[in-house]
Amino acid sequence: MTRRQYWTGIIATVVALVIFVVPFVFIAFTAVKDKAQASHLDFTWPLQFLFWQNLVDVVTTRNYMLLLAYFNSSIITVGAVAMLILFGAMVGYVLQRRQSRWNQVIFGCVLAGLIIPPAVVPTIWVMQGLGLFKTIWGMVLIQVAYGLAFSVLLYRSFIATIPRDLDEAARIDGAKPLQIFLRVILPLLKPVTVTLIVVQSIAIFNDFTNPLYYLPGKENVTVQLTLFNFQSQFSTQFNLLFMNILLVTIPPLIVFIFFNRQIVAGMTAGAVKG
């Protein structure tokens, strides 16, 4: 290792600590302060640690709204990710394996799904017509629609690394197309599936704008919308607000830490070999 590489690594580590670790430490410190000290929003040591008291206050606020929010966000996340895996893998398999004149058109629509920003008002109008506005399952379909393009591209590039000989061998043995996909191809998609689960679950669980637009109502609250519980026009309880942020941030952070290698492996395998 040269001196330049050594100092470059040191500088990169320091920058990463400043960008990622320092804000998290600031949130943790503010979350355990009392209301008066937290209102200063400074990076100081707490005069008294009120972790348990602030935790109980956050959880019990508005008839345990945070627990309801965790339940709603979990349903949305699990339902949307399951559909993204199933439909993304199916569409990616068809685009990669079956050569058709419609492939380019479908692939163009998939790219358009990544490029064109969503239109909120027409989407609300369509959901109202279908009776899905202000419903959990309507929110699930919204998340699927917004994340399907990324899922299809990820699966399509990874399926390109799987030899076609496996498909032909299964076809010779009498397997139908759906059986080939479910029994031969799908089990081989584990690396990219783990990547998709982690990436999309974190994104959907932490989504703020889409539930704000498409899922109004106290009974439909999600974890990110509970941040409004401690903010008002004239005052903000910063200690409870930051405790809420801490509770919302920790689960996705734990998932990312434990599955970081799987994310890199799945993304790299699909990109390099595709």
Image (cartoon, rainbow, N blue to C red):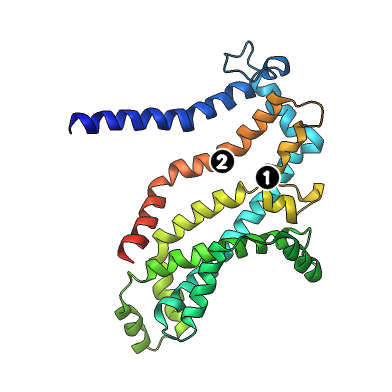
The answer to which quarter of the image holds residue 3 is top left
Whole-angstrom CA distance, mark 1 to mark 2, is 11 Å
Percent position (x, y) of residue 49?
63, 16
Location of mark 1 (residue): 70
Residue that badge 2 annotates: 251
Q: Quadrant of the C terminus?
A: bottom left
Task: Find numbered disc 1 in the image and state the secondary structure of the residue it sits on.
Answer: helix
> Which residue is at a point 50% across and 44% down the rendered structure image?
255
Can you tell which quarter of the image residue 120 is in? bottom right
Q: At 38% across and 51% down in the image, what residue appears?
A: 264
Type of the residue with mark 2: Pro
* Residue 194 locus on image (x, y percent): 45, 56
Above or below, 268 against 228 in this view is below
Name the disc covering residue 21, or none: none
Pointers 1 and 2 in contact (C-beta within 8 Å): no
Using the image, determine if residue 22 lies above or below residue 253: above
**Residue type beneath disc 1:** Tyr
In percent of width and height, residue 97 lies at 40, 80
Q: Earlier in the sequence, mark 1 or mark 2?
A: 1
* Image x and y of residue 52, in percent: 66, 23
Is residue 21 shown left or right of residue 2?
right
Badge 2 marks a residue whose secondary structure is helix
Image position of 130 (left or right of 98): right
Q: Residue at x 41, y 32 (%)?
A: 16
Q: Is residue 164 left or right of residue 54?
A: left
| As drawn, 255 above or below 124 | above
Q: Residues within 10 Å of mark 2 (few under 14, many from 20)?
A: few
